[in-house]
Amino acid sequence: MEEPKNNVRRDGIASDAELKEKYGKVYRIGMTVAEDDETEVELVYRFKRPSIASYDRYVKTLAQIGASRASKNFMLDAVVEEDAERLKDDVEVYPGVAIAIGSKLTDILGLTNAVNLKRL
């Protein structure tokens, strides 16, 4: 997947530099979705660091409403307002995107499988 240029304004979309100025730390999550064997769609969104309150709601609602809806709410809490409508539209077409993005957002907060355990 080709990386967009960091500080270039694209078709009315805010540049990364503008978003950093507005939100502080900003993360770009990009993915390639295969619609079929011949068609791939590249999706890129920018996110703020998720709040602890948002993460707590996510964990609480995972069991209550399911992973897909909990992930969707979690990512919509963190997406920058400039990408929110596009993300909502894309999630209607590709609902699995919510779980993939939710997973990456939890990585930002330290939820990882890269933990070592050793009996002493």
Image (cartoon, rainbow, N blue to C red):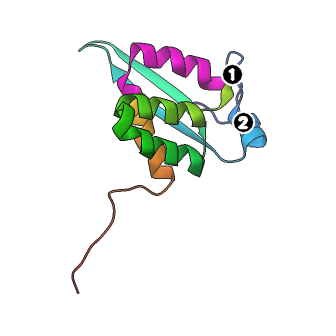
Which residue does the image show at 72% across and 41% down from the upper left? 23
Q: Is there any visible trace of residue 3 in the rendered image?
A: no
Which SS type dominates the magenta stretch? helix
Secondary structure type for disc 2:
helix
Q: Nearer the viewer, residue 6 or 107?
A: 107
* Above-or-below relation of 50 to 12: below
Residue occupied by mark 2: 19
* Above-or-below relation of 14 to 86: below
The disc, 1 or 2, on the residue closer to the chain's N-terminal end is 1
Asked if residue 82 lies left or right of residue 112, the reply is: right
Q: Amino acid at mark 1?
A: Ile
Q: x and y percent of residue 63 in the render? A: 34, 39
Q: Where does the C terminus fall, quadrant-wise?
A: bottom left
Q: Is there any visible trace of residue 4 in the rendered image?
A: yes
Q: x and y percent of residue 31 in the render? A: 42, 30
Asked if residue 2 lies left or right of residue 80, the reply is: left
Which residue does the image show at 43% across and 34% down from the upper left? 71
Which of the 4 image quadrants contains residue 94? top left
Bounds of the magenta segment:
82-97
Q: Which mark is residue 41?
A: none
Which residue does the image show at 42% across and 38% down from the upper left? 61
* Above-or-below relation of 15 to 104: above
Asked if residue 43 lies left or right of residue 34, the reply is: right
Residue occupied by mark 1: 13
Which of the 4 image quadrants contains residue 93? top left
Q: x and y percent of residue 78 in the render? A: 59, 37
